[in-house]
Image (spheres, grey):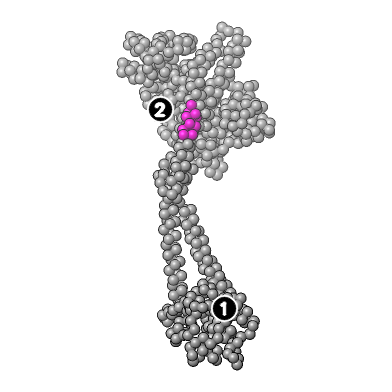
Amino acid sequence: MKSVPKLIGRFIGILLLSIFLLLVLNFFVLFFFSINQSPSDSPYTIAEEIADKLYKTDSGYAMDNATLTFLQNEDIWAILIGENTKTVVWHTDNLPNTIPATYSLSDISSLTSGYIEGYPTYTGDTENGLLVLGYPKDSYWKHLWPSWDYQFIAHLPRTFLVVLFCNVILIFIIYIWTTGKLSRSVNPIVQGIRDLAERKQVQLKEKGVLSELAMNINQTSQILKSQERELEKRETARVNWIAGVSHDIRTPLSMVMGYAGQLEDNPDLTPEERKKARVILRQSKKMRNLINDLNLASKLEYNMQPLNPKRINVIALVRQVVVDFINNDIENNYPIEWKTDDKLSSCIIQADEDLMKRAISNLIQNCINHNENGCTIYVMVHTIQNKCMIIVEDDGVGATDDQIEKLNNTPHYMISDVATTEQRHGLGLLIVKQILQSHDGIMLIGHSKYAGFSVTIELPKK
Amino acid sequence: MSLNYLKQKRILLVDDESQLLDMVVSILKEEGFNNIRTAKNVKQALETAEEYSPELAILDVMLPDGDGFSLMKKLKTIADYPILFLTARGEDEDKLKGLGHGADDYVVKPFLPKELTFRITAILRRSYKDDNPTVRLQDSEIDFERAEVIKNGEHIALTAKEHSILLALYRNAGRIVTIDTLCEAAWGDNPFGYENSLMAHIRRIRQKIEKNPSQPISLITVKGLGYKLTTEES
């Protein structure tokens, strides 16, 4: 199945593209947040700024009201630890009670990087000591021991790329594994659907993630198979029915033909009576042709006529058919003229001899059937490039342009699926068409240059 | 050669339809065949064959107590004579096409009286030789046995090819035989490109059998199609 690798390929493409886009997106988001965390807002810078705002007075230390209000509003407390005394020399009014008043060096070290009593603290330098801001509890989280191996930081861009690459590879492997698993379960389904289209019997294993789908395909296959069997049964029944009916008509028709033939030749009868016998005979011959045609047409239509193709010389075959007609045309109402060039002695095609004979005799019989008062029939075989052409035409009543158009293009009632009230024509030409179809040939109906009807058959030469 | 000796041959006719039997008998009688026995099933056919020893059997394929093919096999074990089948088409026709079953020919129902009698005469002529085996033409006689033509009391020898061609024409006397069939009779299978040779042979045959070879009466050309031999009987 060609489409499965294509499908997987396309998904891998989409996956790689999405990974790339996601990385780009993350990068931008990170960038955006970093921008937002602007230096002016950072507690470290605020602590530095506020330290600058503290000034010394005669009675101690003081700060302007605006800064004090800001601290008040933000719920931030502040203390100033004296340079030498290591005690709180100044503080804001909102200082919690739990904050100690004196500090050792180690206290100062830890509050610089961390907390006092759970309050995140930030420091700013002043001339007289260290200003400490205490932010409300849980307003910031501080990383207490931020230190990395120097090499690690130095190679950070490369490390980042390696990790990224490893991640992509890992994702890729996971994807391949899962799609491989999926395609293993999809492949039989795809094959099954293809088999359905080729009218094969499908029986898939109903397991795995797609078991329900497999079950549906199996059911469809069964339905299709049973429909096909049903159709075949019906077609066989129809062919058998036609064969049976025509078989049963043959024996009674033998008697009609036999006795009519005898009466026609009986010298004791009056010419009038013998003429009547002749009419009976002619009509029963028509019935005979019709039964033969009906049987063959139904077999050809449902592909139940076995073909035995072999190399045959069309000229010899057509000549034999023509001669058979002449030999059997006792009244000589339908003289046949052989118009084939004498220099052309062979034209070889690959065909079923009996069917091809049948096609030619149907064409000649067609001329006879449509010209009750007799006509001359002209038969010609010639070759054009790699085609063999057989032309059967007559100087009889012919057909109108309209009728010819219909004969060439409208399906015969026997194979038409629309109900028709059209005047029905015989099966002779339908059979010719069917026979030609099975031999890669075509049939063209038209006007004859002898003023009657003309049929041209084209067959590929071998 | 008179065909009368053929008309005296004993014929066994087997079909389960008694009306069809009556009709075939009347057709044959009208044609001059006099020795005909009929049977309606395999059992009767075997009994009749035993006592009548027919020289030709005409069998229907479908019989109430068996089929024509197995009946033929049984008949052939008693004596060997030509068999003609009457068939109502369908699968039996395919079987008969090969005629591998030992049948000599078959006629598909419904048939014209003339078709049936022509086939019967052809089979009998092939199978039984006349005591006086010459064929009479307008101006001469052909003796196929000796491969010679007798014209004005003079005996003229036929070559092998001439003999084959004449025999093929005689077997279909009164009917056109195609160029291709005649070439096949003389030169065997796939006889392409022999048309001119055939014309030369026909010319020589005419010199032997016709009074005036440039205006033939017995061996006529049908332009582009073939030739027709007219005998005194046909």
| Residue in view at x 32 percent, y 16 percent | B79
To which quarter of the image does residue A200 belong? top left
Q: Does the magenta stretch include residue A324?
A: no
Q: Mark 1 points at which residue?
A: A94
| Residue in view at x 52 percent, y 33 percent | A435
Give the chain of mark 2: B
Q: Is residue A233 magenta?
A: yes
Residue A351 in percent (x, y) is at 48, 36
SS at circle 1: loop
A176 on left or right of A397? left
Which SS does the magenta portion mostly show? Answer: helix
- Other residues around mark 1 within 10 Å, as few (<14) / some (14–19) / many (≥20): few
Residue B37 in percent (x, y) is at 40, 9
Q: Name the residue under label 2.
A: B98
Residue type, label 1: Asn
| Residue in view at x 51 percent, y 18 percent | A249
Kindly report the distance in space between the C-alpha atoms of the residues bearing marks 1 and 2.
Answer: 125 Å
| Residue in view at x 38 percent, y 19 percent | B67
Q: Which of A342 and B161 is in front in this view?
A: A342
Q: Are marks 1 and 2 on the same chain?
A: no
Q: Which of A336 and A168 is in front in this view?
A: A168
The segment highlighted magenta reads A226-237
- Other residues around mark 2 within 10 Å, as few (<14) / some (14–19) / many (≥20): few
* Mark whose residue sits in front, 1 or 2: 1
Residue A126 in percent (x, y) is at 55, 89
From what the image shows, is residue B54 above or below residue A434? above
Give the chain of mark 1: A
Q: Which of B198 and A150 is in front in this view?
A: A150
Residue A201 in percent (x, y) is at 43, 40
Q: Can residue B125 be seen in this view?
A: no
Residue type, label 2: Gly
